[in-house]
Amino acid sequence: MSSGSSNGTPPARPDNRRPTDLRPIHISYDSLARVDGSARFSFGQSTTSLASLSGPIEVRLAAELPSKATFEVLVRPLSGIPATEAKALAATLRACLEPSLILTRNPRTLVQLVVQGLGSSSSSSASSSVPSSSSSSAVSPGLTTSMINASSLSLLIASSIPMRGVVCAVSVGLRDDGTLILDPSDDEASGEGEGGLKAIGAFAFMITTTTTSTAKDGTTEWPGTAGDSAQKRESTLGSRPRYTSDCVWSSWKSKSTKGGGRPSASASHSDASSSELLLARDLARIGAECVYAAMRRSFEERVGVRTGVSGGPAGEGVEDVKVEMKKEMSEHDVDVDVDVDVDDEDKMEI
């Protein structure tokens, strides 16, 4: 992977982060009325989403499924009525989250997830929130990932639907100089010139805790088959539980332009080399696992229990993920130092 500028140092990011730094993560649990669980997730101060979950509840006869619960996702714009983009985003969120849910436990019921992109409180740009019928702006990858993470938190805090794993997401950008950057801000995503992006995308991973067993020869056996190795990554957090992360959705797209300076509508994975895509996915996987560590720590503090990953001083789980990331990304010559900061001030006391 390219080192960036001519002196070997990538151009500085607007907020002085390293290419492999996440923005500070802020998590809070909003006590919304008439829902079973709600959560707010933010990357920094400008990419914020709110999600609420209701269910299992009574379902309309036309939407009833005899063998499983109906999973409905609604994306609400800040104003107006949902436009085509909001409905497409709702379908994306449903596709990302449904593999993590065990819906067969509650047939003939409804599980309803409502998500809203709040954007920045100081920004009036239409691109900082979900488009309504009066706006045609596309939702940024960063906002999409914050919606996915907020949705997972609302499912966890509701604890009314059995889950196979937790879906976490981050965005990755590819600079014109060939440098991959984790969690690009809105300014970076829309920037041009030095440090501008030629490709950007969001990646979602379902992270599950696994158990191990000892084979006769004394080696450690993992669940699954040898074919899983290309799709699953197994990481060790000292003596803590191991977990696997499967990519359940991605939206890697080139920002190449055609006449008039508008992004090409046909831009897709084929516009970037396969090696760039694989490196972007690897970096996103690491970022998603750090998001998972922050979410797990926050959830533990919220319910007042320890589940085994953070199991010590606050933030210990995040630090373990950082150490493991440094080991695993050394083969790509990437210096990983992801900064994760869970907001403690806005948490709802119990």
Image (cartoon, helix red, strand yellow):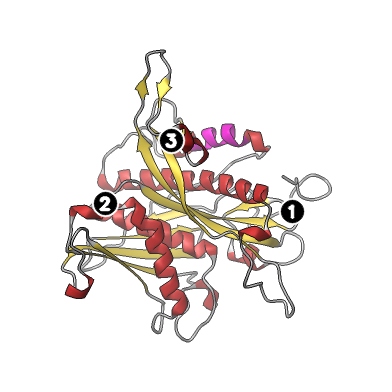
Viewer-nearest of discs 3 and 2:
2
Cα separation between marks 2 and 1? 45 Å
Residue at x-position 61% and y-position 58%: 269
**Callout 1 amino acid:** Pro
> Does residue 305 sit above or below 217 in this rendering?
below
Residue 102 bears which disc, if any? 2
Quarter that holds the N terminus: top right
Could you tell which of marks 2 and 1 lies nearer the N-terminus?
1
**Mark 1 = which residue?**
11
Q: Nearer the viewer, residue 20 or 144?
A: 144
Query: At x 48% / y 73%, what residue is drawn?
Result: 129
The location of residue 201, given as percent across then percent down, is: 57, 59
Q: Amino acid at mark 2?
A: Ile
Q: Which residue is mark 3?
A: 316
On screen, residue 263 versus residue 296, left or right, reads right
Percent from the top left, x then y, of residue 189?
63, 64
Question: Mark 1, residues whose alpha carbon is within 10 Å: few (<14), some, or many (≥20)?
Answer: many
Q: Earlier in the sequence, mark 3 or mark 1?
A: 1
Q: Magenta residues: mostly which secondary structure?
A: helix
> What's drawn in magenta, residue-wise?
321-329
Task: Please determine whether, in this image, residue 330 is positioned above or below residue 280.
Answer: above
- Labelled pair 3, 1 in contact (Cβ < 8 Å): no
Q: What is the CA distance from the residue labelled 3 to the residue labelled 2?
A: 30 Å
Mark 3 crowd level (few <14, some 14–19, many ≥20, 10 Å Cα) = some
